[in-house]
């Protein structure tokens, strides 16, 4: 399969732009796919997102929990309903350091307890919750943080010089039936307990980024379904 890292289509780009550039939040820096498109996936295709945290106003921050949601739906129990599955990625060791030291990164930031993207899911039939991916989870007693530019990125460079905080990859596996339109959300998810926390324990506004994506079943499955319906129609005649 060909690798595609083309510019995001205009419609999808509208989804990934933060609504307030100076806000505490996250942005999608790059999207690439092993398939022919970054907006449409077929079975076996992988899609990778590069993401950067932003805090241009250096908002005081004591805790942060960043997740990816939207690839699964509430009500499922032990399978990912869209069949879009986490297969890998990389995360920064800390975020929002206010002074950069080479090979160490920003200091006085918040350390990340995650060493890689982690699938979060627990069986709860009384209150079904979607599967999601945790990219960052950390807390600090200090609220002295930077704007996100002094952090050591996943490629060993300064995030303010173009490196990123997170890379996460999903693969579409064994999707059958109908195509699905998904909107992946990157950031906090207060309804699931993933929030940004200020010095006094208050929840801080956080600007999520989103990405529109269509997943389609394998052509063979769709073709067989079509042939079966055609045969049934012929028999009825």
Image (cartoon, rainbow, N blue to C red):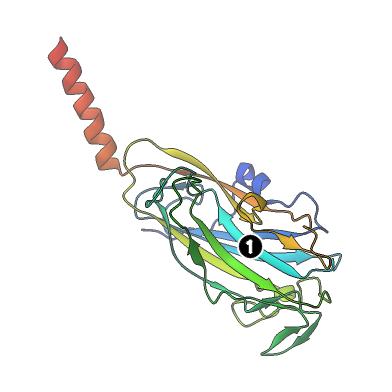
Q: What residue would you read off at disc 1?
A: 66
> Residue 52's spot in the image, x, y percent?
67, 66
Q: Is residue 104 left or right of residue 39?
A: right
> Residue 118's spot in the image, x, y percent?
50, 67
Spot the residue most to the front: 126
> Residue 43's spot in the image, x, y percent?
34, 50
> Residue 14's spot in the image, x, y percent?
68, 45
Frontmost residue, 156 versus 95: 95
Spot the residue most to the top: 237
Label 1 Cα crowd, 10 Å radius (few <14 / some 14-19 / many 20+) = many
Q: Is residue 94 above or below residue 166?
A: below
Frontmost residue, 63 versus 33: 63
Q: Residue at x 55, y 56 (%)?
A: 6
Looking at the rendered image, the quarter that the N terminus falls into is: bottom left
Spot the residue most to the right: 57
Q: Is residue 220 left or right of residue 155?
A: left
Number of marks present in the image shown:
1
Q: Residue at x 31, y 41 (%)?
A: 176
Q: Is residue 184 left or right of residue 96?
A: left
Q: Residue at x 16, y 16 (%)?
A: 234
Looking at the rendered image, the quarter that the C terminus falls into is: top left
Q: On the image, which quarter does residue 179 sit in?
A: top left
Q: On the image, which quarter does residue 23 sit in?
A: bottom right
Frontmost residue, 101 versus 72: 72
Q: Residue at x 25, y 35 (%)?
A: 223
Which element carries disc 1, helix, strand or loop? strand
């Amino acid at each position: 399969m060909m690798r595609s890292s083309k510019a995001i289509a205009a419609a999808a780009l509208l989804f990934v732009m933060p609504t307030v550039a100076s806000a505490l939040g996250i942005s999608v820096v790059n999207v690439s796919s092993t398939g022919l498109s970054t907006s449409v996936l077929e079975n076996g295709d992988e899609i990778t997102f590069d993401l950067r945290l932003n805090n241009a106003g250096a908002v005081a921050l004591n805790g942060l929990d960043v997740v990816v949601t939207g690839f699964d739906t509430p009500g499922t129990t032990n399978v990912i309903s869209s069949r879009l599955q986490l297969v890998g990625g990389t995360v920064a060791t800390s975020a929002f350091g206010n002074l950069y030291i080479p090979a160490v990164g920003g200091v006085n930031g918040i350390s990340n307890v995650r060493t890689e993207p982690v699938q979060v899911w627990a069986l709860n039939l009384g209150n079904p919750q979607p599967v999601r991916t945790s990219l960052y989870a950390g807390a600090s007693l200090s609220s002295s943080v930077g704007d996100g530019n002094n952090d050591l990125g996943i490629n060993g460079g300064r995030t303010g010089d173009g490196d990123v905080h997170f890379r996460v990859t999903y693969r579409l596996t064994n999707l059958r039936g109908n195509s699905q339109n998904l909107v992946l959300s990157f950031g906090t998810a207060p309804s699931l307990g993933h929030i940004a926390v200020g010095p006094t324990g208050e929840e801080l506004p956080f600007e999520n980024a989103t990405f529109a994506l269509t997943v389609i079943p394998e052509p063979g499955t769709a073709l067989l379904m079509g042939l079966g319906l055609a045969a049934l129609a012929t028999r009825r005649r």
